[in-house]
Amino acid sequence: MSQVPAALALTHQDATMLLSAQSHIGAKNCNSQMAKYVHKRRADGVNIINFGKTWEKLVLAARVIAAIDNPADVVAISGRPYGQRAVLKYAKYTGAQAIAGRFTPGNFTNYITRNYKEPRLIIVTDPRTDAQAIKESSYVNMPVIAFCDTDAPLSNVDIAIPCNTKSKNSVGLMWYLLAREVLRIRGVLPRAQPWEVMADMFFFRDADEAEKEAAAAAEKAKEAVPVITAMDGAEATNEEWTSGDAVEDWSAPDAAEATTEDADNWA
């Protein structure tokens, strides 16, 4: 952590978040270029990433992104479903462009393409899944920032941020931390002030799980609201009609006189 200034050092809260999201859990295979980011190898063969170096490279990437004057010249790309929600949120809060889903070949090289772009920098979620975007960026001399697992290829990658790219929580948290650090370096968000946006907003959510949560919330709302049945209304109506002094026989002379007197009083 000696290469990171004291103001940009990793805090205890951020370290806890990285451990909770299992961002330090790598793959069983390890690329030779990623070996320097591996802290040790567990007995079951899983490589443990040094998240101190993860934070070091994340701060470096944020400083590079913040140096670009126009935020729209940065493109966030994710072909994996776990990162599609994250890149959209990142683009929303930092002003970058997002490509979520399949990357159309020719987006960076063929100007006839409908979604043709000329960015100055691209950020990818996984170098293996987003290989087409990295390949085209090398043709037009664009720098690449990539979140890399221990088995990720680093060909044409300029800044590799070592992290767990197999977990949806890890991917969402890394995009969240990168967006927050970019805003802090730009001066939009004070470093002493916590960001009001929660990290959960960047996490992948399955459509089936979202529907189940919505159905459960609707059921709780129905249980909280008291339901008045037709029988309750009928009982209340009967009580109102039967309350008070009822006239048993309207043909009786006393009842007729009482009715006439009431009519005169209302008149």
Image (cartoon, rainbow, N blue to C red):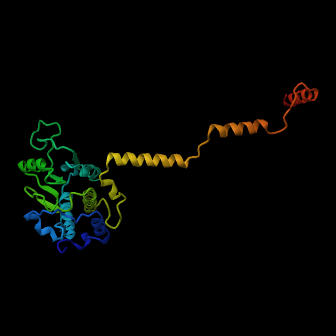
Percent from the top left, x then y, of residue 217?
Answer: 45, 48
Kindly indicate the quadrant of the structure image that contains residue 188.
Answer: bottom left
From the top left corner, tell me how far across and down residue 52 is, in percent: 21, 70
Residue drawn at x 79%, y 39% is 243
Q: Is residue 158 left or right of residue 169?
A: left
Give the image location of residue 184, x and y in percent. Answer: 28, 62
Residue that protrudes farthest toward the bottom in the picture: 2
Q: Does residue 36 sit above or below 89 in this rendering?
A: below
Q: Residue furthest front?
A: 44
Q: Residue furthest left?
A: 139
Quadrant holding the C terminus: top right
| Residue 45 found in image quarter | bottom left
Find residue 176 and report its image quarter: bottom left
Count of marks, rendered view: 0
* Furthest-top residue in this view: 251
100 or 20: nearer the eye?
A: 20
Which residue is at 30% across, 54% downward?
Answer: 202
119 and 232: which one is in front?
Answer: 232
Q: Residue at x 93, y 29 (%)?
A: 254
Looking at the image, residue 225 sits to the left or right of residue 126; the answer is right
For the N terminus, the image quarter is bottom left
Front one among 130 and 181? 130
Q: Position of residue 156 (x, y in %)?
A: 8, 55
